[in-house]
Amino acid sequence: MNERFEVPDEDVPRVAKALSSKTRWNIISLLRDKSMDVSRIAKALKQTEANISAQVKILEQAGLLKSHYEPGEHGVRKVCEPAVKQVIINAVV
């Protein structure tokens, strides 16, 4: 995990969008110092796995989460973890 993620100007809209959703913010908070698979995240947040998967994809595209696949009970499971500890947005407005 990277300590700091300094967001370049061209990536500010993508990162801001990722952080603007309460569900995505809850995912980041839940994973603060650990990793969890999509099913466990969905159960913890009382959301569907499909919704959590979609939200995780947005967080991955913003560079805030990373994930990998592991064997599970019924196939593979997607395990997510934080990609960074701190996000720094230095945007000139």
Image (cartoon, rainbow, N blue to C red):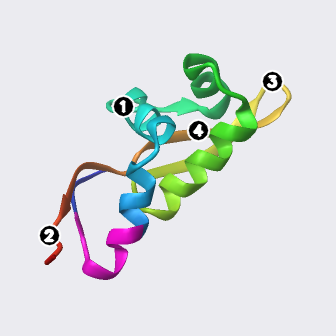
**Nearer to us: label 3 or label 2:** 2
**Nearer to us: label 1 or label 2:** 2
Determine the secondary structure under disc 1: helix
Within the image, what quadrant is residue 38 found in? top right
For badge 1, the amino acid type reads Ser
The residue at 26%/79% (across/down) is 9
Question: In the rendering, which numbered label is found on residue 29?
Answer: 1
Q: Can residue 18 be found in the magenta stretch?
A: no
Considering only vertical position in the picture, is 13 above or below 41? below
Q: Mark 2, residues whose alpha carbon is within 10 Å: few (<14), some, or many (≥20)?
A: few
The answer to whether residue 80 is left or right of residue 15 is right
Considering only vertical position in the picture, is 63 above or below 47? below
Determine the secondary structure under disc 4: strand
Q: Give the residues drawn in magenta, as a range.
A: 6-13
Q: Which residue is mark 4?
A: 79
Q: Which residue is mark 3?
A: 73
The residue at 60%/32% (across/down) is 37
Q: Which residue is mark 2?
A: 90
Whichever of callouts 4 and 3 sits on the residue coming sooner in the sequence is 3
Considering only vertical position in the picture, is 21 above or below 9? above
Mark 4 vs mark 3, CA separation in Å: 14 Å
Task: Say if mark 4 contacts mark 1, CB within 8 Å.
Answer: no
The answer to whether residue 20 is left or right of residue 75 is left
Q: Can residue 8 be found in the magenta stretch?
A: yes
Whichever of callouts 1 and 3 sits on the residue coming sooner in the sequence is 1
For badge 3, the amino acid type reads Glu
